[in-house]
């Protein structure tokens, strides 16, 4: 007959037995502790402020002017801690922005320095600065735009009010523009500007007489015009379409959950081995390559169908479009599916027990997904971590899906990522063929 004492003893015994069973599995315990530590450390490192955490937004500058003003702007931007500037030609800059290696490309037109200095006072004929931007990096592009405005205004005003930079002919040109009938402004406003030009002419002459080289405070109380206009264009292949953030999200989550499918495929092989099914199949006249190949083919088909269904939902409900090559998209999907199936065989080859293998495979997959930029875009990683992530198949898969969807790249952009994914698949498959155990 059970008593309250016997029930408490039984309860304590059962609890202690469960605790001993759990803590006796060192591998399971390690995975349960290691996984949250690694993930928390990763996000903490990426998002925590650090001494070296200045944005260092990578951009290119195309200087079609080559004058003193644009040289001063480029020099100031190269010394700005928030930017990583490279001077380039137009075609190279456009290609790097389109590939996501740069956030923006700034183009200064010919005679920018002269026309911008004149437009500081008379708004007619303002030069146009081109800003080619990566539409997926809106925050960083906004930083670039603000810093561009700051450095251009500093350089142009320094040029405009430098006693060695303004000639009497320049002031006379401003007067002629001001007197033109098409120049906007009331007679009183034009008279004020005319008086300002008279004072500026006298001031420049007086400063040259004493050989002064300092800059003159720019027209206190006067309203100066923005000396340029900005033409922003997207690096998308289809410039008429806005960037759709769902495209990257579906690429990242698709890669993650298809890899989880690979884990399930590997664990299913372990269960079949535990039940002795593989040993029975080996008794039949079937080669190792045939048995493992059948599993890999079925896994590839399942993974490809699921990935296509995921993107079908993205297209149907979230406006995602394959703006690049459709054959390229299908090629990337196929190669990633082959890699996933081979990853499942690899898990079955290295695994021993089902529980321990599942835990280890989940941790490894989460690390691959983190490094691959599936959760957060890889461009926010530190430079060394961006380089390290290129050693993972997930980074190549996510970037390839981005290239075929919102970036709008052609078929050739799918070739290298597909080759890398197949190389990982071959390595996983060869290891599985070599190490797979047919019985417990």
Image (tube, grey):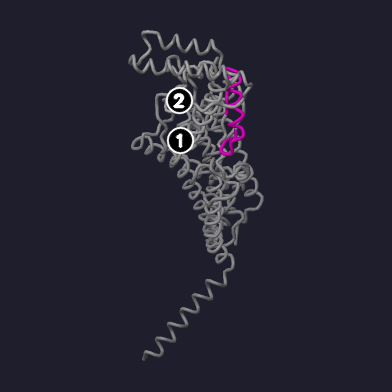
Q: Residue furthest right?
A: 434
Q: Which residues are magenta?
A: 60-84
Foreground: 201 or 388? 201
Q: Secondary structure at mark 2?
A: strand
Task: Tell me the quarter of the image containing the C terminus.
Answer: bottom right
Q: Residue 79: say if magenta.
A: yes
Relative horizontal placement of residue 227, taking residue 58 as reference (left or right):
left
- What is the quadrant of residue 294 in the picture? top right
Q: Position of residue 81 (x, y in %)?
A: 59, 39
Image position of 347 with respect to 238: above or below: below
Q: Quadrant of the N terminus?
A: bottom left
Residue 138's label in the rendered image is 1
Q: Nearer the viewer, residue 70 or 283?
A: 70
Density class for disc 2 (Cα within 10 Å; few <14, some 14-19, many ≥20) is some
- Identify residue for label 2: 232
**Is residue 424 at least partly visible in the picture?**
no
Q: Marks 2 and 1, Cα distance to the nearest angstrom?
A: 12 Å
């Amino acid at each position: 007959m059970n008593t309250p004492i016997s029930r408490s003893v039984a309860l304590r015994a059962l609890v202690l037995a469960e605790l001993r069973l759990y803590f006796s599995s060192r591998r399971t315990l390690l995975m349960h502790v290691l996984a949250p530590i690694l993930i928390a450390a990763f996000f903490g490192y990426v998002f925590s402020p650090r001494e070296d955490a200045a944005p260092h937004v990578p951009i290119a500058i195309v200087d079609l002017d080559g004058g003193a003003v644009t040289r001063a702007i480029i020099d100031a931007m190269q010394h700005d801690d928030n930017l990583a500037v490279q001077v380039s030609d137009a075609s190279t800059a456009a290609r790097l922005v389109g590939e996501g290696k740069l956030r923006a490309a700034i183009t200064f037109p010919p005679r920018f320095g002269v026309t911008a200095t004149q437009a500081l006072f008379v708004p007619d004929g303002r030069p146009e600065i081109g800003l080619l931007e990566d539409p997926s990096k809106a925050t960083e592009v906004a930083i670039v735009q603000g810093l561009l405005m700051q450095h251009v205004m500093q350089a142009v005003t320094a040029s405009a009010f430098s006693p060695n930079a303004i000639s009497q002919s320049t002031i006379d040109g401003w007067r002629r523009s001001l007197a033109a009938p098409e120049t906007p402004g009331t007679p009183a406003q034009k008279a004020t500007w005319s008086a300002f030009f008279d004072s500026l002419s006298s001031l420049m002459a007086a400063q040259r007489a004493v050989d002064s080289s300092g800059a003159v405070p720019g027209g206190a109380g006067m309203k100066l015009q923005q000396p340029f206009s900005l033409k922003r264009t997207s690096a998308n292949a289809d410039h008429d379409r806005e960037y759709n953030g769902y495209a990257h999200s579906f690429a990242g989550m698709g890669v993650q959950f298809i890899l989880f499918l690979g884990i399930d495929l590997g664990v299913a092989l372990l269960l079949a081995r535990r039940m002795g099914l593989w040993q029975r199949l080996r008794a039949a006249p079937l080669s190792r390559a045939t048995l493992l190949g059948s599993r890999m083919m079925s896994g590839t088909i399942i993974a490809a169908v699921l990935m296509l269904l995921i993107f079908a939902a993205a297209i149907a409900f979230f406006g995602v479009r394959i703006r690049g090559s459709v054959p390229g998209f299908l090629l990337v999907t196929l190669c990633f599916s082959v890699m996933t199936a081979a990853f499942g065989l690899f898990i079955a080859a290295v695994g021993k027990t089902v529980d321990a293998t599942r835990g280890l495979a989940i941790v490894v997959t989460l690390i691959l997904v983190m490094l691959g930029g599936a959760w957060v875009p890889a461009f926010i990683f530190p430079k060394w971590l961006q380089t390290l992530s290129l050693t993972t198949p997930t980074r190549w898969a996510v970037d390839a899906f981005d290239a075929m969807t919102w970036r709008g790249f052609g078929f050739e952009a799918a070739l290298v990522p597909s080759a890398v994914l197949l190389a990982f698949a071959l390595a996983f498959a060869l290891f599985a063929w070599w190490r797979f155990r047919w019985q417990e």
